[in-house]
Image: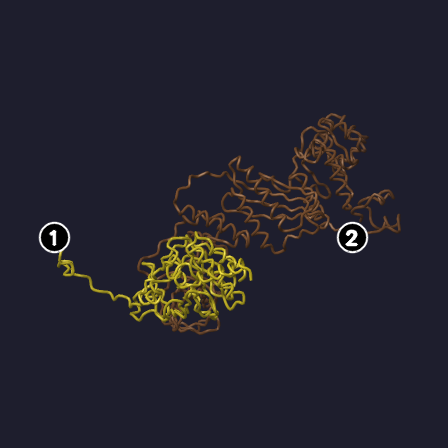
Chain colours: A yellow, B brown
Amino acid sequence: MSGARMSALATLRGQIERIETAEVVHQRDRVALGHGEVDSALKGGLARAAIHEVFCEGRQGAAATGFVMGVAGRVTARRPLLWVRQDFSELEAGALSMSGLAELGLDPRRVVMVRAADVESALRTSADALACDALGAVVLELWGETRQFDLVASRKLTLAAQGSGVTGLLLRMAAQPLPSTAETRWMLRAAHSPPGSMWSAWGAPRFDAELLRNRHGPCGRWIMEWKCDECQFSESSAYPQPVAAAPAHRADPAVPWQRRTA
Amino acid sequence: MIHALDDAASRLGLHIGQPLANARAMCPDLRVFDADVVADAKTLSDIADWCDRFTPLVALDPPHGLFLDITGCAHLFGGEAALLQTLVRALGRQGFAVSAAIAGTSVCARTLTRQVTGTIVADGGEAEAISRLPVSALGASEAITTGLRRAGLKTIGDVASRSAHEITARFGARFSTLLAHALGQGDAPINPRKPLPDYIVEKRFAEPIATDTMIAMTLSRLADTLIASMEKQGKGARRLEAAFFRTDGVVRAIMVETGRPVTRSAVIDRLFRERLDALADPLDPGFGFDMVRLSASRTEIVVQEQRDLDAHVHDNDELAALIDRIAARIGGKRVVVHLPQDTHIPECAVIAAPAQHHLAAAMQAEWPARVESEPPLRPLRLFDKPEPIKVPFATVPDGPPHQFTWRRALHAVVRVEGPERIAMEWWRQDGKQFTRDYFRIEDAEGLRFWIFRDGLYEGEVFDDDGKPVPPGWYVHGLFA
């Protein structure tokens, strides 16, 4: 083998190594989700410039959508979000509702939706979009098992994401996990609202999130709650019980300095 | 009935409109084909496509005529005579019998083609050129032509020699206008098939091109020229059309649209590459293209703005470019942004609009604010059409169900919040729509639904006899 070819091969090997080494990924910035245990398992938060997969059963589609939307809201940081979906998934799981998005505390103005007819054009569009660094995140929503989304396609997406720094989120409804180059892989289910009296406000999005695969840390299973007002995830908490108001004629003992200044 | 006939048949004395049986009696070995008006129209339109290579202003003159406005185009083909000859020969080679003429007004030219071919009339010579032609060449209605002949006016010159008010009194104002136009006094406007593009650049090839690389190279050179000519006037293209003229006469036009005016040829190049890549029926060069034309059919003035180092502006440009690229490949209607609407009806509260045209509007849209410290009141996934569910019984007539069947699975209701009553908009609806009572529901598994009862209980839904019918239940959305 000639010297030139040898050096070319060496360069290529070097490139592949750089792409695949853990250090590079560790240096990338991470976005804390807000849930303490999850963030510590993720070593500080979800990595940007990587692909994250979210799987769910068919009927749990809405829960997985909520989780992906929350993660996207954390990751995008006021940049536009491109949501690529396949026509079929809208029939099965319903269309993404922008009113619902606004109710989650997220901004529908920054969502651009691509209605791809089939998996191939959806994949190609998302690979294109992941290479565009003006975006905050790209969500690819697919329904069911697909032949087209194999290891090669997954690697393409990962490379595009690493090159541009855009985060890719894959929402796979009614699908089984297959080998891929994703940074993390989640299995989502809806979680019950916490027990409480019937008249207390219930219905905040709660997820039973299972981290099936984590390239750089442990896996686990947590109940995560999305706080619509703060726009972040949190530990599952019972709703605060109504407390009697402090009497108006006496100073509140919790604020002793009030008396001093008065 | 005879619909059309060729020269040989008309020499035998047959005429259009004659019953077929009579024609057969006159000429037993007549060859007859069924008339196909639709196919004729299609052929005429195909020929018009082909004629686009001479001028962008081609108008149809059914059933078998075409107007070409060659004002300012003739010199490109070596003068009017050469242009006429090229056109007649090329069409003749394809097996069409052509009669063509050039004149100062469209009506005059049409009158000439009905009798002689190859005439070129200089400005002012219209009256003289057509004076010897029979009145039938004017193409007026049958009654008028017969009337003129009965009045002893055999040629157009005869008619023209009468004073205009006599003609108008006898045959109507329309005919007198037609006559005036034919004589070169005023002109009827032609109605071109396509609007005139703002900018056109084209490239002709002595040797037809067929390979993808050549096509791509040609397009990018044309884009350079187009951009250069638009730049002089400070314009940018919003809609671009590339037309590929095949040697065998087939013309294929491909269009791309952009969200904001394009001023760089590299962008045009890339958009067309995406579009050509994604064509359902790829560009078929056949024996090659002998001409490629690039035209900007919609342009806008480009506002030259001073770009600061604000990354936000840059990001918006990048996003618009990405949207253009995706739209070029999969279609502009498939890339959408969302605009809020002023209505309470859930399925109408948001409309999706093409992102290319509405990106700026969507970025500034005012969305209704959510209520602080409330759980989401609207579902994250909404079905376009609410899906019917089976509710076995409801203990309270107006209340929520205790269990329901949706998509063949039974869901036991654990928590309920509601009802939220949404009345339909009586000032807008056409048919009868019922008031809906929406409930937020959580089932035993933790899935959260948004269901509604379509119609008030025993208040709105009646059968044909006027008896109340229990209203139906539907799932409209799913909460996260």
* Place of residue B134 in the rendered image (x, y in percent of width and height, measured from the top left): 80, 33
* Place of residue B28 in the rendered image (x, y in percent of width and height, measured from the top left): 89, 51
Q: Chain of mark 1?
A: A
Q: Nearer the viewer, residue B104 or B91?
A: B91
Q: Chain of mark 2?
A: B
How much space separates mark 1 and mark 2, taking CA atoms?
A: 106 Å
Mark 2 residue crowding within 10 angstroms, few (<14) / some (14–19) / many (20+): few
Would you say the residues marked 1 and 2 are in contact, meaning their CB atoms lie under 8 Å apart?
no
Residue that numbered label 2 is attached to: B34
Q: Secondary structure under badge 1? A: helix
* Place of residue B43 in the rendered image (x, y in percent of width and height, measured from the top left): 72, 48
Q: Nearer the viewer, mark 1 or mark 2?
A: 1
Residue that numbered label 1 is attached to: A261
Residue plotted at (55% across, 51% down)? B328
In the picture, the quarter occupied by the C terminus of chain B is bottom left
Disc sitting over residue A230 in the figure: none
